[in-house]
Image: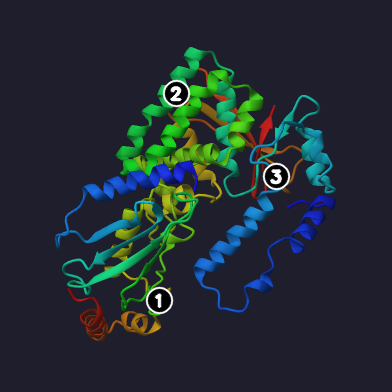
Amino acid sequence: MMSGQDSEVNQDDTSAGTINPSDYVTEELDDVTILRLTQEIKDHEASKTPLVGELKPISVLLDEYADSTFRAKIKALGGGSTGYRPIRGDGNCAWRAFAFRFFEFAQSYAPDQIAELKSRIMSLTKLLNEAGYNENGYIDFVEETESLFDRLPGLTTETLVSEFNNMEVSSAVIVHFRLLAAAYVKTHAEDYMPFIDDGEGTTIEEYCNRQIEAFAVEADHLALSALVNAVGVADLGVVYMDRSEGEDAVVHTFEPMSASAKERMKIDLLYRPGHYDIFYR
Amino acid sequence: MSLASTRRLLKEFRAAQKSSSDSEEELVRIRPVSENDLLHWVGYIRGSKGTLYEGGRWNIDIQVPKTYPLHPPEIKFITPICHPNVNWKDGLVCLDILKGQWTAAWTLQSACMAILVLLSDPEPNSPLNVDIANLVRSGDEEAAASLVHYFTAKYAST
């Protein structure tokens, strides 16, 4: 994904790291072991970066790329007025990026607006019930989001970043948002089935389980659309920083089908193949 | 163990206590080994009526990771069971929701229910027990049924 020196340094780190494959080759690997080892490698890599990083000027990205296509697109994003906030690449990045930016907007609101937003998100719990989720399965995550809303008026951007670097808080909000997106798909089956139907009989349940509910599985296009529709108070712009032709990065905008708020948040993510960070215009 | 894991497991423990009757109607029953260690549960699964596994009762063992419910529990059969997706030697179950497809909204109880469903709806294309999987795959229902019935009677009859 990245060219340049940074990634080479990372690879060296891995081979000299604490995970030594020869420790495991003496016995046959079963699926559970393979899963655990894969997770260990991912965790080991991921632990080098914070879950949610500091806001950086967009020009910092230029240092990561030698490729002229990428450099042209980064330059086209604008100069000093734009920035990005790196998010850990652990399979939850799009979800974490969206959730953080959502709360960052909310944090800047007046207390009564925060209260309104909170009741909007909490009212979505009925969607979880309609979709057939067991309360014991989701209630802890919903309560963690609720409690974050309650702490929000006392937080600054800096302390919100700390909140999101707390694995427990961050993970709970991500699971909550994943379940809301999946519940939206399940309760709007007629809208989504044409996109899910792959000719192999994949059901809505299977799709949601595989692509949305499973923790650490990257968000696809449909998942992002469902998230935006479920939350209903934010537009999402995804800036595609890839090798496609043209000097400008393609931007894909998701808008909620039925928006409950007049003024919607504008959340932007910066997509580079396989990874999302937050983009600031 | 994190606070979130403890809180969640306590809720599941209370739910498990409520639904307590050892009646034959109850197909899945689980409980922690001790109230002081919510990371280790045991219980049983009964075969559903009208399936090959009717009449059997298999003990199971559940190891819960400290990161539960973000990561799945490890569930295995203690009583030997003849099934395409269960390893005969160690009782480990091959089921996607217990691996990469795990969802934090599942509970230990619902994971066990998924195993119960797997009993009557095997996936012979990802077998852990090749002998029975081959019979199921080749459509030899009679031979598959007699093999399952033999081992159920030998190890798991109630």
Indicate left or right for B86 with A35 as reference.
Answer: left
Q: Amino acid at mark 2?
A: Lys
| A141 is higher (above) or lower (below) than A91 | above
Residue under label 3:
A49
Quarter of the image that includes the C terminus of chain A = top right
Which label lies toward us, 2 or 1? Answer: 1
Q: Position of residue B45 (x, y in %)?
A: 26, 65
Mark 2 in CB contact with mark 3 (< 8 angstroms) = no
Q: Residue at x 54, y 68 (%)?
A: A33
Which disc is residue B87 wearing?
A: 1
| A131 is higher (above) or lower (below) than B56 | above
Give me the C-alpha separation between circle 2 and circle 3: 30 Å
Q: Position of residue A35 (x, y in %)?
A: 54, 63
Which quadrant holds residue A125? top left
Q: Amino acid at mark 3?
A: Thr
Q: Which chain contains the residue that carries disc 2?
A: A
Q: Position of residue A162 (x, y in %)?
A: 63, 32
Badge 1 marks a residue whose secondary structure is loop
Q: Residue at x 43, y 41 (%)?
A: A179
Q: Amino acid at mark 1?
A: Asn
Have a look at marks 2 and 3 and say if they share a chain. Answer: yes
Which quadrant holds residue A183? top left
Q: Which chain contains the residue that carries disc 1?
A: B
Tell which of B129 and A275 is nearer to you: B129
Q: Residue at x 17, y 59 (%)?
A: B22
Badge 2 marks a residue whose secondary structure is helix
Which disc is residue A118 wearing?
A: 2
Q: Residue at x 81, y 56 (%)?
A: A8
Which label lies toward us, 2 or 3? Answer: 3
Have a look at marks 3 and 1 and say if they share a chain. Answer: no
Badge 3 marks a residue whose secondary structure is loop
